[in-house]
Image (cartoon, rainbow, N blue to C red):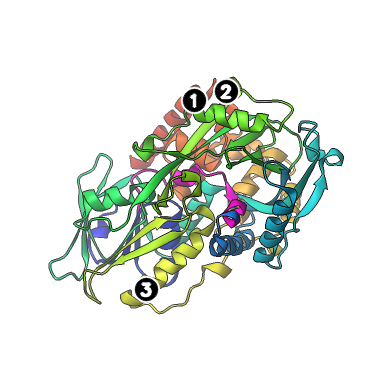
């Protein structure tokens, strides 16, 4: 841990390295504030890497009357497509006519298009599935439906990009470090923090304002680390997903209506698989231990089986994952109907100039940037910064692709590096965007990438992930940063992770010597 953190106080300390914490750190650093971001595990190691990987308005939220949330989410979808075209891309969805009447779906999609406003994505339209490529995978009775637009996003890499930009703008980012204690100074002018990295002694730090962006742990952090009891309640709702061999061979996704009123997505994944999700189940246990239950796996298989010609079975599941959403408890009995709205709770110790504590309650992946902007708008003036909001118009690291045209940019990348496998270049382009230029500097052949530690994973990329993206373990690399873990699942993943962990340990030990 950097010993410099216990000298001058930070303006702002953000506890929690998920999407909200990383987004707030980036926004605040860009406004000239001295920022500390603290994450007890790896960045995006829990909820923020276990989403359905969609940047979307939330079509079903229209039915629940949350028009403001849908409008904001659709606006943020557009921001992501502009500022991170390597991490966020358009995706067309097919909605077979199911439990709801056609007129209701048509009206809902018309409103969805209107709320999205003018943009690059095509609007919705009816589709005769018997004459569309997406109909071939469906059972014969599903002949009519609709298509509409939303977007796919790499959730974990989105967190990494925000943390990278925060650091580039002066923020200090500490991973695998706990904030074990936070207390206001006697004069309430600042917070006194006690931080502890794995295997290290506690180290003090100070900050003028504190942000609790710990997601599912927000209430626990307040209880255990601060003298401030939580003023709101959250419901911890587990969302589980499964990945199976591809159920279809085209680039559209499906949104499927279930008899219980829920919807399930079936999304093309890495060219060879289909990702299916999500469930919504109360999660009374530690969010770090979230796992897809056997009942949830069966539910997802059955949900898809109502529509597809081939019903996947639990035995075919190659990978499953689950994340716990911290939803504001609005008293709704059904977990699937709990609002995805967020709340920013500012505690100022009854003093205009007191050391503020801001807790982020609720929220959703798509609206993280707007949440961060609102949070910094609240805190920045108290900390002496009157710089305007800026993140809606500035590309994330790797996102400065000319005109956002990934197709043309990727074609140029392939042309400039004919000695490298196209599949590797395509993955790097989607993972690192314009940062590929640095990774590929001086590279002409595969040999220039160094040792191939695992198939498709070379030393040059691993060095970058360690030095620039805080990667320290095989889990960090295979599941959150490169998404290569699935090619070893399920039978070979333990051996692959063990080999990679040994390589990383040797590399990190060498750095310390």
Of residues 21 and 374, which is closer to you in this image? 374
First in residue order: circle 2 vs circle 3: 2
Residue 180, x across and y down, in percent: 23, 49
Q: Is residue 267 visible?
A: yes
Q: Secondary structure at mark 1?
A: helix
The magenta segment = 38-62
User: Which residue occupies 51% across, 53% down?
Assistant: 365
Residue in the picture at 46% in, 56% down = 363
On screen, 85 above or below 316? below
Q: Nearer the viewer, mark 3 or mark 1?
A: 1
Numbered tag placed on residue 314 in the rendering:
2
* Magenta stretch contains residue 123: no
* Screen quadrant of the C terminus: top left
Q: Residues within 10 Å of mark 3 (few under 14, many from 20)?
A: many
Identify the residue position indicated by label 3 in the image: 380
Residue under pointer 1:
294
Q: Is residue 41 left or right of residue 273?
A: left
């Amino acid at each position: 841990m950097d010993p410099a953190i216990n000298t001058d106080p930070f303006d702002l300390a953000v506890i929690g390295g998920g999407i909200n914490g990383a987004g707030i750190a980036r926004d605040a650093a860009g406004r000239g504030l001295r920022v500390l971001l603290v994450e007890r595990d790896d960045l995006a190691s829990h909820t923020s890497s276990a989403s359905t990987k969609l940047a979307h308005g939330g079509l079903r939220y229209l039915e629940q009357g949350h028009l403001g949330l849908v409008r904001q989410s659709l606006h943020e979808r557009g921001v992501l497509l502009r500022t991170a075209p390597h991490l966020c891309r358009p995706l067309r969805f097919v909605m077979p006519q199911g439990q709801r009447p056609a007129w209701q779906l048509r009206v809902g999609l018309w409103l969805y298009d209107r709320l999205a406003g003018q943009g690059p994505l095509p609007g919705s339209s009816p589709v005769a599935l018997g004459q569309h490529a997406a109909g071939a995978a469906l059972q014969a009775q599903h002949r009519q439906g609709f298509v509409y637009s939303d977007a796919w996003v790499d959730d974990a890499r989105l967190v990494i990009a925000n943390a990278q930009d925060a650091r580039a703008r002066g923020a200090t980012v500490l991973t695998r470090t706990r904030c074990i204690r936070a207390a206001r100074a006697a004069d309430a002018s600042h917070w006194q923090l006690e931080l502890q990295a794995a295997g290290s002694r506690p180290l003090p730090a100070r900050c003028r304002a504190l942000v609790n962006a710990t997601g599912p742990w927000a209430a626990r952090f307040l209880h255990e680390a601060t003298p401030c009891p939580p003023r709101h309640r959250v419901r911890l709702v587990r969302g589980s997903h499964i990945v199976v061999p591809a159920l279809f061979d085209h680039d559209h996704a499906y949104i499927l209506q279930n008899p219980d009123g829920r919807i399930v997505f079936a999304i093309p994944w890495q060219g060879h698989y289909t990702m299916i999700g999500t469930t919504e189940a109360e999660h009374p246990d530690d969010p770090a231990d979230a796992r897809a239950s056997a009942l949830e796996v069966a539910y997802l298989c059955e949900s898809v089986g109502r529509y597809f010609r081939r019903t996947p079975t639990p035995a075919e599941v190659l990978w499953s994952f689950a994340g716990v959403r911290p939803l504001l408890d609005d008293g709704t009995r059904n977990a699937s109907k709990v609002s995805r709205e967020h709340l920013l709770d500012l505690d100022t110790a009854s003093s205009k100039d007191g050391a503020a504590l801001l807790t982020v309650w609720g929220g959703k992946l798509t609206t993280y940037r707007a949440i961060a902007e609102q949070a910094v708008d609240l805190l920045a003036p108290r900390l002496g910064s009157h710089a305007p909001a800026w993140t809606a118009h500035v590309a994330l690291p790797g996102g400065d692709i000319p005109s956002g045209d990934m197709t043309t940019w990727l074609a140029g990348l392939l042309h400039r590096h004919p000695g490298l496998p196209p599949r590797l270049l395509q993955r790097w382009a989607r993972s690192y965007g314009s940062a590929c230029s640095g990774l590929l500097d001086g590279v002409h052949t595969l040999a220039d990438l160094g040792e191939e530690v695992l198939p498709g994973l070379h030393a040059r990329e691993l060095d970058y992930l360690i030095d620039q993206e805080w990667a320290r373990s095989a889990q960090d690399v295979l599941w959150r940063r490169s998404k290569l873990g699935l090619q070893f699942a399920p039978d070979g993943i333990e051996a692959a992770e063990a080999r990679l962990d040994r390589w990383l340990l040797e590399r990190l030990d060498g750095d310390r010597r």
